[in-house]
Amino acid sequence: MQLSKRITGLTGGGSDGWDVYYRAKQMVADGMDVTQLTIGEHDIGTDRSILDAMYQAALAGHTGYSMFNGNKNLRDAVARRVSERTGVKTTPDNVLVTPGGQSALFATHNAACDQGDTALLIDPYYATYTGTIRGAGAVPIAVEARADRLFQPDPADIAAMANGASSLLINSPNNPTGVVYSGETLQGIARVCQAHGLWLISDEVYDTQVWSGDHLTPRALPEMAAQTLVIGSLSKSHAMTGSRLGWVVGPEEAIYHMGTLATHTTYGIPGFIQEAGCFALAQGEAFEAQVAAPFRRRRDLVLGLLAGQTTVRAIPADGAMYIMLDIRTTGLSGEAFANRLLETHQVAVMPGESFGKAAAGHIRVALTVADERLADAIGHLLSLAGDLPRESR
Ligand code: PLP
């Protein structure tokens, strides 16, 4: 039987970018001791208190159908959080609860784009972005954030691609680079969106992981609340990746229609998960800071280990749970380097090429294992990088 082009063409014909990750998983399954620095998964599980809240909620009967667009108490909690942190008035009618940020990405592109429309995104990008856009029927067009600008996108480059486009997807703090977009970058982006009538889809799932200054949301910029759809999630902020709990914040009309999409796709999120989400949000900023702390500490650890050598250069990472390393002096592509590192040192990292073209010759290191193991893995990485320039000359 013939399958639809939409589903068979989701990855755009190439690999889905996760080859090294799959290889590493297979090696682990074969009994090898591999250090996994690939995916953005905390090394702590979901906190016991959140699991208790989930269990109690299930016992209390939150096991039936829930509100397809999110229960009122959770939408209230998200709206309060967003209002307090951004200063933008936000009500429960501005909030749609989704099964994770991933589903929110799909909903927002469905809201912003008609079939065949251009959806802009910034390269390097989180590996699912292009497939999600295609799944919504739109055409992903990447605008490069260049390595020589330390991966801050240039609004002029976006403007050059914006004619006729419907949306622009940005992500700060950024996966894969760890870069936090400056106020100037965000203001420039907002001006482009206003000039070209673009929906700005702002993926802020790492908003609690910012190492200097405060998290900035473009929704708070003048006039931008009317055309910005913000994606949030408890996956990274509360180590709740498996709970699949996220949201979209946006104008009421957009939220209403995405709610209709939810009725016809997800039909809501389990009530006991939503109750656990309410409990998690009520723990406040101290809890979130505790979840974020290891990533900052490990970023500093890696920077310390890289000091005093010039082969591997770190991209200044001000947020998120990753650090991007420029390995171009080795003469290898990010993909070749990652594969070599896996084969010879049993350390798995993501090639920059998994995230588009702009991060070619880079690798992304997820700061997701205990400090000692991470330090050991960086030692291996430096040892390989140190050997390579001689080899490839
Ligand atoms: N957006 C970015 C930038 C991510 O890195 C991820 C996950 O790693 C997601 C969205 C999806 O997160 P979730 O669906 O777990 O909320």
Image (tube, rainbow, N blue to C red):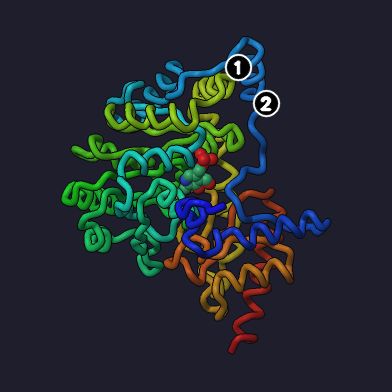
Splitting the image into 4 quarters, where does residue 85 fall?
top left
Q: Earlier in the sequence, mark 2 or mark 1?
A: 2
Look at label 1 and name its amino acid. Thr
Q: Residue at x 64, y 58 (%)?
A: 21
Dot 2 alpha-carbon crowd within 10 angstroms: few under 14, some 14 to 19, many 20 or more: few
Q: Picture coordinates of residue 368 (x, y %)?
A: 63, 49
Task: State the SS at label 2.
Answer: helix
Q: Which mark is residue 381?
A: none
Question: For this rendering, which residue is in front, 329 or 361?
Answer: 361
Task: State the SS at label 1.
Answer: loop
Circle 1 is placed at which residue position?
63
The answer to whether residue 279 of the structure is visible from this angle is: yes
Mark 1 residue CB less than 8 A from any atom of ligand 1 = no
Q: Picture coordinates of residue 214 (x, y %)?
A: 38, 41
Splitting the image into 4 quarters, where does residue 25 fall?
bottom right
Q: Is residue 271 left or right of residue 208?
A: right
- CA distance separating discs 2 and 1: 20 Å
